[in-house]
Image: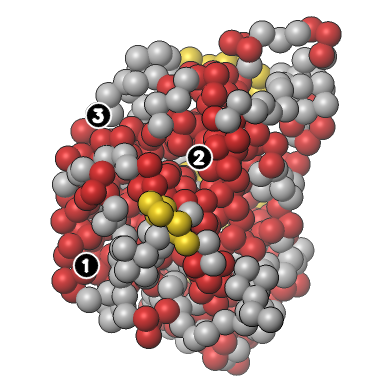
Amino acid sequence: MKTHSVRPYKSAENLAREDQLAWKLAALAADPVPVEADVAAMIGNRIIDNAAVAVASLARRPVASARAQALAHPYSPGATVFGLPAGQRVSPEWAAWANGVAVRELDYHDTFLAADYSHPGDNIPPILAVAQHVGRNGQDLIRALAAAYEIQVDLVKGICLHEYKIDHIAHLGPSAAGGIGALLNLPAETIYQAIQQALHVTTTTRQSRKGEISSWKAYAPAFAGKMAIEAVDRVMRGEGAPSPAYEGEDGFIAWLLSGPKAEYQVPLPEKGEPKRAIMDTYTKEHSAEYQSQALIDLARRMGPKVGDFAKVKSIVIHTSHHTHYVIGTGANDPQKMDPTASRETLDHSIMYIFAVALQDCGWHHEHSYAPERAQRPDTVALWHKISTLEDPEWTRRYHSRNPREKAFGGRVVVTLADGRTIEDELALADAHPQGARPFQRPHYIAKFRSLADGIVPPSEQDRFLDLVDRLPGLSAEDLSGLTLSVDPARLGAPLPTGIFDWQP
């Protein structure tokens, strides 16, 4: 790996293309280095993981809405949509839209946290959609996804967006564009322009994940994937993009991030170096924001020690800056304490999550968010006794690059009415690669089987898993079957008509 300094330049300085970050990302994507076997296997795991969380959300309103929009754009050859027959195709950017929302709706797939935050599995829907549309094979898909994961993870390591309230999809648009460029074997010049275009149109604010959080939280990554496809298509036709997008005098860093005197350090593999960034990422065992994963595991083991929750006087979670200010009481969001809040809001309330996990000694992607669960009087009482505090040591460990120090959890102090305290801490979720029970292929399959149960017929589950097992050898025809079909009755209630399917 080589670390690259990235800073704004005045237009008169005429920064050479090969010195621009977008060009370096494009060169990385275009480098045809072989994908190592463990990386290819992990890509298969994440395809399984995405499918698992997508089918579990098929009947939810945001997913049904996105699917209805996609169905208004049938296309041949096109790409598949989760839940529909494999032969029913839509335009690839709309397949990426529908599948991206399905994958993201439950906040239950893979994650990478460093200087910024990300869900790198959001790259899979747009790249798979284009692969199906243009007839690429399994090896092509693996190579493209390795490139997309590498770009996104390296950007997340080097450039913090949330400090300036920019949403993390600003790193996803460029990574998806780079992955699509790798998939299509495009020259670096074309990928360079597409990455810049994707960055320009996917830079949005973090209000998507603040206050009263709406279904746009699930749509935002799908939007980035859809924009990446359109950016690549546009540039393939000979069009350019705002340049230099990152370093420009009026560009991304100078005006939306740290300003004209800023300097970021972005690590990238050198030419010929394998793309292994996916191995730094991790998935979720629980359907909740990643900083809650270790704390859910901690609550599972603390619950029996607490016993009578009515005797709890207070619970303080000592944790990192991010956990305190984004999903904790440091956010100053009253919605995080509201029993009538949306699922998306509760997903970003560690106070709610810890209360439920403590009482139930576990977490469920549906039952734990049900209105009747959130409004249970004893839960509300416990929930409102929970607060968070930033602990500098947990913040330091959160940002550490030493895997033995890295931590996304916290220390919990439960104070009882009689003055006694119960304390415990956990640095990493059990499912984390460095955790007590790291996820391996059998765990991904078990998660898939559990979430698909009662929705996807067993024979269809087996067919899909068999394809993933054979991913490196899949033909273009095989790749068209990398989806899951369900009974239409499993797709949710009819939706109101929108513009695309308007019937006068």
State the image coordinates of residue 133 (x, y, percent, origin top left).
39, 47
Name the image colouring.
secondary structure
Q: Which residue is mark 2?
A: 176
State how far apart marks 1 and 2 are (Cα): 27 Å
Q: Earlier in the sequence, mark 3 or mark 1?
A: 3
State how far apart marks 3 and 2 are (Cα): 20 Å
State the image coordinates of residue 11 (x, y, percent, origin top left).
82, 14
Q: Which residue is mark 3?
A: 36
Q: Earlier in the sequence, mark 3 or mark 2?
A: 3
Three-letter amino acid code of the residue under disc 2: Ala
Tell me the SS state at disc 2.
helix
Q: Earlier in the sequence, mark 1 or mark 2?
A: 2
Q: Residues within 10 Å of mark 1 (few under 14, many from 20)?
A: many
Three-letter amino acid code of the residue under disc 1: Gln
Nearer mark to the viewer, of 3 and 2: 2
Q: Residue at x 78, y 36 (%)?
A: 256
Nearer mark to the viewer, of 3 and 1: 1
Q: Residues within 10 Å of mark 3 (few under 14, many from 20)?
A: few
Q: Which residue is mark 1?
A: 461
The answer to whether residue 104 of the structure is visible from this angle is no
Tell me the SS state at disc 3.
loop
Q: Residue at x 66, y 26 (%)?
A: 240
Tell me the SS state at disc 1.
helix
Left or right: residue 446 versus residue 435 is: left
Three-letter amino acid code of the residue under disc 3: Glu
Given residues 151 and 479, the one toward you in this image is 479
Given residues 490 and 329, the one toward you in this image is 490
State the image coordinates of residue 294 (x, y, percent, origin top left).
44, 58
**Looking at the rendering, which quadrant does residue 239 occupy?**
top right
Task: Using the image, determine if residue 365 lies above or below residue 93.
Answer: below
Task: Using the image, determine if residue 344 lies above or below residue 367.
Answer: above
